[in-house]
Structures are given as structure tokens and as C-alpha cells.
Image (spheres, grey):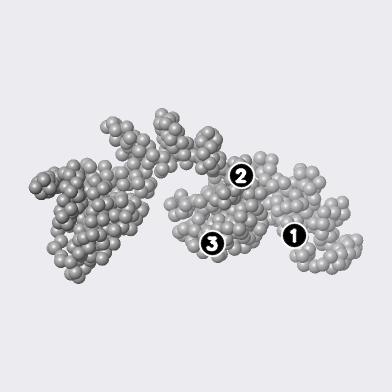
Amino acid sequence: MDVMGDKATLLETGRFAQPADFEQSADLAQPSDRDEAGEAAEEARRRLAAESGDVEAMSVLGAMLLRRGDLDGAEPQLRAATAAGDRAAANNLGVLLHQRGYPEEAAGWWRIAAVAGSAAAAHALGRHHRERGDEPAAEYWLRQSAEQGHALGAYALADLLEHRSDVGAEQWMRAAAERGHREAAYRLARTLDRKAADAGENGADNGVIGVIGAAGEEAEQWYRQAAARGHRRAALHLGAILEKRGDLKEAGRWYLTSAKDGEARAACALGFLLRDAGDTESAAVWWLRAAQDGDGNAANALGALHAERGETQTAERWYRAAMDAGDVNGAYNLGLLCAEQGRTGQAEQWYRRAAYAGHREAANALAILLLQVGDAAGAEPWFSKAAEAGSVDAAFNLGILHAGRSTEDDDTAALRWYERAAAAGHTEAALQVAIARLREGDEQDAERHLRCAAGGGSAEAAYRLAAVLDARRPPAPAHELGEPAQEKSECEEWYERAASQGHRRAQVRVGMLAAARGDVVEAARWYRSAAEAGSRNGAFNLGLLLAREGSEPEAALWWTRAADAGHGRAALRLALVYARRGELAEGQRWADRAVSLGPAEVSERAARLRDALREELSA
């Protein structure tokens, strides 16, 4: 419970509103409604009326003096009006006595006013009882206040019921919110948020829930009402909702409003919004403001910004600040920074610190570090800890660790971890599961995992998926060079996706399919890409294509590259080229090479050619 009568809190709204309500007559204007001279004149008029025995004037004058902090001047006026039966004066006398440090006497006057029908006094009395642990009495008086339509009473009752997990809390929180209580509007929105999250409608991001669905839409309305009344946390949550929806301009406005009111998380979020918009300098300003207010996330962002600029000392300072603010990411980022600089010992220390604090990616990074220095036994428990905590990368790494041991039990364990990582969307893990399924003959499940991995950007998965689909389709009719190209099949589209990602075997296959369609230019392009990337098959096929087009000298260059890389057929082709040119010794040399490279069919043909060339040379 807030300290009742805290002047700083009460004057914030311009009236003694909460936690102990200040009552005033309807004709008493707020301080903002008149200038100082006008207020002084009003006070003088009320004082004259009070001196002549006007009870209402005494009550109003006492209220004015109480609001101004003149307790000595207010007390006699309020006591006189209270003695004459003015309930507003009785309530305000209770406020005054509470401020003087006489809570029991204050409660007595609040009781008198509450019994006389003062909702404000009933609210103050209810909070008095709650402060002393008498919840039944607190609930009684707060309910009296709330049922009279008093917003603060409804809010205090809702707070009490929520503390007891009473289902009636939401009803009274809603009543307070509908009567303009901004904290009630915010807390109602949070309640609706949690309901939506429990129902699976939405997710949380750094403690700020972004709403979706019916409950989420209502929550957004209450956030908006609270934010419009100056509630900075409501403005923060509203900004998060709008950012998730993609309405970045309005989200930025609410983040700015909240940040200017002192909400560090809003300043941090605004920084990320500005960074994503390309305004790094402005982002840094807001991150600095948030970090100075103790926001660890903002300190980490500043550290990352300086690290990107190569300012490692400044980056380290901000990472330490994040850690001091209780953000375990600071220790993890310090570990990353040290690892990048080759300070392995210090990196290990920071990773350990973060890992012991429950940072799963730090545990994974620590395990990798231990694995790199040959401590597989020390790495495995950290991989396990990170994987069990939900690290997808750690689950995949555990799969690799087990797969490298080549025992049946380890193979089973590897597949289990690969499956776990794949289920969480890990692309390479899905590829490994697919390869295992292909070995087992389960082509359908293999295809499913290949599609997941290929969709996630794995070139190898795209190539293997294309190969699976390619094996199913019926043989295409032969095409002559120059014939019109036919529509591409799905398998060719996957080959092309893999090829465009630099997969050499896919590039060769795309070239072969293009050649089969008669698209010589396309075939040459893909063969050349594969050959230049080091594919001996690409170099060989490019040579064949060039030879057909009459460019045998250039073809020989590509066959030479392929043969040097161990391609037997390319060596045989070179032997034939040199034999036709009459360069028998060179032909014999390439024939010898083709015999050694194989395969068997090539070796047999190359041996016959070599023997013939040898006879010719010895003749």
C-alpha cells in the first residue's frame, strides 16, 4: 500500500486524489484553473465567509489550505466544519491527521464520513485497514466505496481481490478503468494480455507482451487509454504491440512518449527501432539514456555497436555495465568479445559465468570452446545443459558429437538430438535427419525433412531433394541441340536453387538438364560456374559442350583442368585429342593417366589407346 498523504504523490495530479482522497466542494476550482492572484482572492472570500460562520466556507477553506500544505491553518477550519456535520470536512480532516502521523484518529474521522456516505472516506478507511492487515474490514469499506462509483475504491478493491486470486478482481479493475483510473486500465490490459498468452493467442518479447486475438484487441484498447492518460508502461506495451503489427511510425511515437517519461525499456526499444531504420546515431543516444537508467539490454546494444566499430575497450565497458545491471547477456557478450580477440582463457571465464547463471547460448559457446581445445568430456555436459534449456544449436552440436563416435548407441543418440533440433527449425539438423531417413529407406519422411532444410536455405538439402524428385520422374524424351526449351520440373527448380547458392554438383546437374532441353547457352553457363568453383565434372562437361560447338582448343583446356583434378574420362579425351594432332608422346602420357584414374571402362579403353600409341612411337 502506498503511504497515504505523500505530498509528492498527491500533488502530481493537482489534487489530493490518492491514496487518501481529498474531498472538496464542487465550486472549488483546481489550482490550474486560476492564477495565483485569483486563488488568493478566492481564499480571502472564503475566509470572510468562514469567520461569519459559513460551514461550507470553512470546509472549502480548510481544503484549500490542506492542498497547499498549510496543515496548521487547515486543521481548525476542518474541525469546525466537521463539528457542524460536513462529511467532506471529516474526510479531509482524516487526510490531515494521517499526514501529521495520527492514523488511528484519522481512521475515526474517515469512519464518521464513510458512514455519512462519503465514498472517498470509505476508500481511505479501507486502505487504512488493509495497511494494518485487517483484510475483511478493508474489503468491506472498499466495497462500500466501489459500489458508490468511486474509481479509487474500485481499484483498491480490485487490488485486494487480485492479491487473494479472487475471480472478482477483474470486474472491479474494469469498473475502475471505465471510470478513468489509468493504473486500473493498465493492469486490466495486463490481465487480458496474460489470458491471451495462456490461450496461445500471443507471445512475449523481453517482458512486453504483443497481443493478438479478441482478448488482445481489448487489451490494446486499455493500453491505449492508460497511455493517453500518461501511463508510461502502458505506452511501452502499446508501442510493442504496434511494432509487432508493423505499424512502426505509431510504435515509435508511443516509445518516445514513454521514454521521455523516464521508461528505460521504452528508450531501449526506441533505439532498436531507430537502428533498424538505419539511424544508428540516434539509436545510440536513446540506448545511452536507457543504459544510464540501468537498462542492461540497452547497455548490451551499446556494447555491440562499439564492438562493430572496432572500439573493443568501450564495448567491454558497456558489456560490464549490462552485467552490473543484472543482464546475464553482458557476461556472454564479454565471452564473445574475448573469443574474437583470441583471449580464450578470459572467454571461457565469461562463458562459464553466464552459463552458471542459466544462459543457454553461453553454455553452448563454452562447450564449443572446450571441444576446440580437445576437452570433449568437458564439453558434452555443457552441450546437454544448453540443449535441455532449449538451445537448438546445442542440440545439433550434441548430435555431431555423438555421430563422431561411430557406435550404434551414439548413432541413435545423434539422430535423437538431430530430430530435436530439426523439430525446432534447425536447417542442418533437418538435413541430417533426412540423410538418416534415406539410409533407412523412408523416402517420404526424408523428403519432408529435406523440404524443411531446403526451405531454410540449405543448398545441400535442396540438391538432395531435387535428386529424390529426379529419381521419381519418368525419363524425358531426348532433345536435339537448338530445340525449344520445355517447362522446368520441380526437381529442376530445386537444382537451380541449390546451384544459385553455389552448390557445384547442382550446377553440373542444372547444366545437364539445360543441355538435355537444348539450351546450350544456359548449360555452358552452369558448367562454367561449377568448373570455376573447382568441379571436375563441370570442367569435363563444359569441355564436351565446347568440343561439340567446334571449340576443341578451349575444350582441351577444361579437360586438362578436370584431368588434373582426377577425372579419368577427361584424361582419355585429352589422350585422343593429342593423338589426333599427332602429338603421340603427349597422348600416351594422358592415356597412362586415364588408366590410373579409371573407372574400369575408361581404364580399359585408355590402355588400348596407350598400347597403340606406344607401338606407333616405337615403329
Q: Nearer the viewer, residue 190 or 441?
A: 441
Residue 8 locus on image (x, y percent): 75, 52
Distance (Cα) linking label 1 and label 2 = 48 Å
The residues tagged by marks 2 and 3 sit, at their Cα atoms, a distance apart of 27 Å
In contact (CB < 8 Å): disc 1 and disc 2: no
Which label sits on residue 313? 2
Q: Quadrant of residue 598?
A: top left
* Residue pointed to by mark 3: 277
Compare residues 9 and 479 and report the one nearer the observer: 479
Q: Residue at x 38, y 37 (%)?
A: 398
Q: Amino acid at mark 1?
A: Gly
Q: Residues within 10 Å of mark 1 (few under 14, many from 20)?
A: few
Q: Look at the numbered discs 2 and 3 and tell me whether their residues touch, using CB distance below 8 Å.
A: no
Residue 48 horizontal side relative to residue 510, left or right: right
Task: Provide the secondary structure element on which disc 3 rests.
Answer: loop
Q: Earlier in the sequence, mark 1 or mark 2?
A: 1
Q: Position of residue 257 (x, y in %)?
A: 63, 60
Residue at the image position 70 percent from the left and 53 percent from the top? 18
Residue 577 seen in the current view: yes
| Residue 445: assigned label | none
Characterize the local packing of mark 2: few (<14), some (14-19) or many (20 or more) Cα atoms within 10 angstroms: few
Q: Give the number of marks.
A: 3
Answer with mark 3 or mark 1, whichever residue precedes in sequence. 1
Q: Secondary structure at mark 1?
A: loop
Question: Which residue in the protein does label 1 denote?
Answer: 14
Question: Compared to 398, does 186 lie above or below?
Answer: below
Look at label 3 and name its amino acid.
Ala
Q: What's under tag 2, amino acid-wise?
A: Gln
Q: Residues within 10 Å of mark 3 (few under 14, many from 20)?
A: few
Residue 360 appears in the figure? no
